[in-house]
Amino acid sequence: MTMRGRIAPAVTAIGEAAGLLRAGDLVAFPTETVYGLGADATRDTAVAKIFAAKGRPQRNPLIVHVADADAAAALAHMPPAAEKLAQAFWPGALTIVLRRRAGCPVSAMATAGLDTVAIRIPDHSVALALLRAVALPIAAPSANPSGKVSPTTAQHVADGLGERVALILDGGPCRVGIESTVVAVEPHPVLLRPGTIGREALEAVLGAPVAVPAGGHDGPLLAPGQMESHYAPRAALRLNAVAAGAADGVLTFGAIALTGGAMRRNLSERGDLREAAANLYAALRELDAAGVAVIAVAPIPDTGIGRAINDRLRRAAAPRGA
């Protein structure tokens, strides 16, 4: 019998995890981006457990993870633009929103009742081994309470979800550290969530512009990561700060000077945005755990991966419950 909330080394527990998923249980597992909270995407009762465990609004769709492009094509239509992106970036940190096929077995709860499904092939040996072992599409948002800081280690998952998950596969720290880029391709390409695969890279592959929608989501959410308040620590965030209060936590980048503060973390001493992305959530968690009421965040360059980092920081700083 599996002890709920148990962390297990991924190399020895893939078979156990696959059995739990087939039985309708929740399993947390590592990907290159963040740890995911997995459930059988074809089973309503299993998908419902994700929403209950996270406290996630049911209007917020989930990403469905599959092992290969054939599995993706069995669930959804792959127009030429999607084929190009898949060939260029899968496996990888790109989620493509596609039209469901007739008879697609993915639960309507996982897609928030939309006629589209968000699909990704993760670039992580543990995630791929699990997907091959279970031989099912797996719905898997980040393995944390809804709206809170995403997990990049197995212990982060245990800290946030505790016994609400049957098993946590420990595959070490996530190397990318922020969630996947999300793009829709029909009727034209639209960037729904920035990530480490940037707009320019998408446009280079497609040979066409990729639109960026205006803010605000009064209508249906088309993809994860579009809630105005998201990725938030307990502490309040103050962005683009030039100084910090004496009791504040400080989050800085490279050689950017920011005076004051009781505790500080540098996302990348050498000013590397990829390193900063990988360290972002762990640094927010460390400052939060120290008990600071405010985290002052130095300006982060808004270029390349910096755009994705700033997207996460803006949502983390937004009014809670927005």
Image: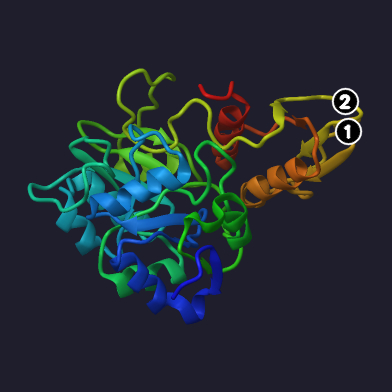
Which residue is painted at 24% across and 31% down in the image? 188
Q: Earlier in the sequence, mark 1 or mark 2?
A: 2
Residue 101, horizontal then vertical, whole percent: 12, 47
Looking at the image, is 298 positioned above or below residue 217? Answer: below
Residue 28, horizontal then vertical, whole percent: 47, 60
Residue 276 visible in the picture: no
* Res 72 → quadrant: bottom left
Which residue is painted at 45% across and 39% down in the image? 55
Looking at this view, is 225 or 197 the one in front? 225
Residue 268, horizontal then vertical, whole percent: 74, 48
Looking at this view, is 3 or 126 the one in front? 3
Tell me the residue that label 2 is attached to: 245
Label pair 1/2, CB-CB below 8 angstroms: yes
Q: Is residue 12 left or right of residue 172?
A: left
Residue 89, horizontal then vertical, whole percent: 37, 55
Tell me the residue that label 1 is attached to: 261
Q: Amino acid at mark 2?
A: Gly
Q: Number of labelled discs?
A: 2
Looking at this view, is 292 or 68 the one in front? 292
Label 1 secondary element: loop
Which residue is painted at 50% across and 62% down in the image? 30
Q: Amino acid at mark 1?
A: Gly
